[in-house]
Amino acid sequence: MSFRKRGEILNGARAPPGAVSRSIPGRTIPGRTIPSRDANAMPNVRGPSQVTPSLSGRMASMNIRGGSSASTNAPQGIEHGAGDVSNVMSNHPGIRPSPVSATFATSTGSSDLDKVLTHIGLPLGNSILVEEQGTTEFNSILAKLFVAQGIVHNRLGGSSNTSKESGNTHAIVISLNQMFGKELPGVYKGSRKDVKKQQISDEQSKISVQNLMEQKNTPQRYKDFKIAWKYKLADEQKEKIDAKNMSQKGDNDEYNDYSHQFDITSRMMPAPTNTEISFVSPNLPVTTILSQVEQIIKNQPGKLIRIVIPSFLHPAMYPPSSFRTSSSIALMHGLRSINKLHDDRCVIFASVSTDILNKLLRIQIQNIFDAIVNLEPFPQDMLQFLERIYKSQPNKVQHGLLHVLKLPVFSERGEMQVKKSEWAFRNGRKKFEIDEWSIPVDDVESGDSSNKQNSDGASSKHTHDDGHNHDKPTSDATAPKNTKISLEY
Amino acid sequence: MSLPQRQDLTLFSDQSVLPRELLNGDGHHMFLVTSTMATQPLWLLTALIETKIKGAPLSLNGSAARRSENPATQEMKTPVVVASFLHEHSFYHQALQKLRINANAYKVVDLLTGFVQKCGGKPRDVVLKELLEQFTPDSQSTILIEQPELLLSLLDGLTSDELNQKFLQPLRKKCNLLIVSSSIDLFQDNENDPLDGSRGAVEYTRFISSLIYTSIVVMNLRSLETGRAKDVTGSLMISRGGQAPAGLSVHVVENEYLYLTEKESTRLFYR
C-alpha cells in the first residue's frame, strides 16, 4: 500500500533517460502510456526491452516518413551512421514526389505557395526567387517560413543540439543578420483556447493518484458539464465519422510532417543552433562565399540543404560594389552551380526588393532562377477599399497580388507559365495565404447608390404626383436600377 | 473545337531545317535563337540537334517522322557539341535522351558548374582562351552555345566587342555551324520599363545586335501579346539575319508559327 499524496505524479510525463514506457500493472488505461524521452538510451535497459506501442509510435513520428515499418523493424537505439546517408534522405519527412513531374520536392513552409508552384513544393535542385515591389517586407516572412520548415524537419529527424550527424536538414543563410535564426516563427499550435485546453488535458494526462481516481472512459466534455442525452449521441456519431475518415486518409498520412503551419507571432523554441543553421556573410568575396557554402554542404552529408538569401542586395547588408553584375550575378551563378551539383539534396530560396534594382540587374537575376514569384502589395486606397467591402470578414482582406513568372521544371521545358494577377496573398498570424484573385463586389456602395436612387425616385414621383401624373415612365426608370446587375454596369 | 493542322518546321527554301549543302560546305555559319523566360527554347534547340544528328526534326515534324525509316535521312552524322552557361550536363543529356538520341552522337560542355570558382581573379583574356580550348576544331561539326551573353556579367569589364572578337568569332571558325541561344528579356516591355543608358545595358544591346547581324537565320520565340492561353504557348518567328548564306543555292524562308508546348512535346501551327 502506498501513501502517496493524491496529486503527486507517480512517474512524471518525462521519463528518465533509458526508461521504458510502462503502465501500471493491472490497470490498462488507454492512451496513458509514458513515452520514453530518448530512444537512443534504449540499450541501457537491463533485460529484454519491451517496447510499448507508444514508444514505436513516437519513433514513427520523430523520424520515419509515413509510417512505422522502417522504425519498428530497425533495431532500437541505433543512430544514423555515415553509411546511412541514402536512408536518411529516403526517409526524410520533408521530401515527397512531385505529383506533376518525375522529381522530388520539399515544402517551402507555406502550403499555399507549395500549391502555386504546382509540385506541392520546390523540386530538389531548383531555386526560387521571391521578388517584392514597394517597401513592404512580405518576402522576409516567406524566407523565415522556408528556414523554419527546414528546422522543423530537422527536429523531426531526431536532431540534437550537440551532434552534427543527427538530423536531416541544414539551413545556410547568406545574411549579415545573425538574429535571423532567433526570429523564426514557431509551429502553430491552434487558437489560444485550443492551447489552454491542450495544457489542461496534458496536466490531466499525467499519472497521479487524483487523476487516476477521476479517470473514466468518458469524453472530457462529459466531465466539464452535464449535457443532454442527444449530445452524447452526436458524439458517438462523430466518433464513427472520424474513424471512417481516418481509414480513408490512406496515402495522405504518409506525408503528415511534410508541411507545417507557422504562427508568425510566436518564436521557434528552442532557437536553432549552429548545428541546424549556418550563416555566411555576404560581404566576403564571391569565391569565398561559394567555397564556404560548398564546405558546409560537404560537412553535412546526407542532409537536405536549404540555402536562403533573404533580402538579397539590401543596402544595409550589401556593399555598393555588390550591385555590379560581376559581383551579384557571379554569386548567383555560383550558387546555381552548387545547387545543380547537389541537385538531389539542395534547394535555394532568395528574396529581393525590385525597387532597388535596375532593369539589367533584375533581368539577369531572374534569368538564373528556376522559379520566380513577384509580390505586388496593394496600395493604401485598395486596402481601404477591401477593408470596407470585407468589413464583417476582416480575415478575407488580401494584402497584394502574387504574379508567377516562372515555374520550376515547366518553364525550362518551354511551357509558358507566366500568370499575372491570378493570385492574391494575405499574410495572417497563422498562415501566408494565397488565393485566386477576383475583384470583390462593392455591396456597400451599390447598396448606398440603390438607396439613393430609390429615394430619388420616390422624391421625383412625389413631385410628379403633385404636378403631373407620369407614373409609368417613372417606374420604368427606377425598376431596372433596383437590380444589382444593372447597378454594377 | 479541333486543333488546327500541325505544320512542319522548315527554315530554308528546300523545305529543310539544315540544308545538306550548308552542312557539307566549308563555310562557318551562325544561327541565332532568341527567347524570353516565358518561352524558353529547349524544345527548339533539341530539335536542331536532332536535325543535325538524325537528319530531320523528328520530334517536331510528323511527316519527317514518317520518313525516318528511309535510310537517306540517317546519313548526316557529324559531331555536335552542346555548351551552356545556364544548364548543367545532365539537363541536356536528359532532354536528348527523351528524343532517343544516342549519347555518343553529341558532347555536352558544362560551362555552369564551377565556372565562377575556376575563373575567379583570372584576366578576361585567359578565361576566354580557356573556354575556347574546351572546343575541338572540326570543320564539319555543329556547336550549340546557350547564353554566352552571361559572360558580360560574369567577367568584370568585358565588352561586347571583346566577347565577339575573342570568343564567338574564333568559336565560329572552329565549326561548320554555330547555333547561339540568347535571352532577350532585357528588351521586352520597353514602353513601361525602358532600359537605362548604363554601360552594361549598352554592352548587352550591342552584343545581341551583333549576333543578329552575323547570323543567317534568326529564330525568335516570344509569348503572345494577349498573355497566357491554353492552346498556344507562343510564336516562333523565323527571319533572315544580317548575313547572307554565302555559297548556298537555298535561302531562308521567313515565316511565323504558333506553337504549343505541353507534356514535353511541341506542335507547330501556321499563324
Image (spheres, rainbow, N blue to C red):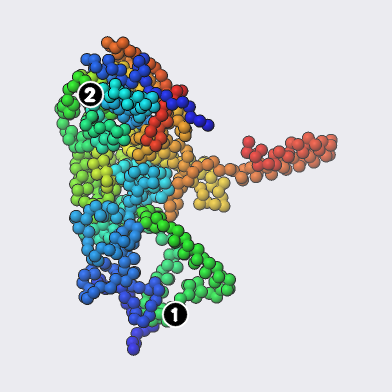
Residue flagged by tag 2: what amino acid is it? Thr
Whether residue A328 appears in this view of the structure is: no
Residue flagged by tag 1: what amino acid is it? Glu
- Residue found at the very far bottom of the displayed protein: A1
Q: Residue at x 52, y 51 (%)?
A: A394
Residue B78: mark in rendering: 2
Is residue A271 rendered to the left or right of residue A452? left
Q: Say what secondary structure mark 2 lies in.
A: loop
Q: Residue at x 34, y 60 (%)?
A: A67
Task: Find the distance from the CA under tag 1 to the CA under tag 2.
Answer: 86 Å
- Whether residue A168 is situated above or below residue A119 in the rendered picture: below
- Whether residue A478 is situated above or below residue A1 in the rendered picture: above
User: Where in the figure is residue B157, as x and y percent of width and height?
Assistant: 23, 27
User: Where in the figure is residue A465, as x and y percent of width and height?
Assistant: 83, 39
Q: What residue is disc 1 on?
A: A214
Whether residue A101 appears in this view of the structure is: yes
User: Where in the figure is residue A120, as x and y percent of width and height?
Assistant: 39, 47
Q: Say what secondary structure mark 1 lies in.
A: helix
Q: Residue at x 79, y 39 (%)?
A: A461
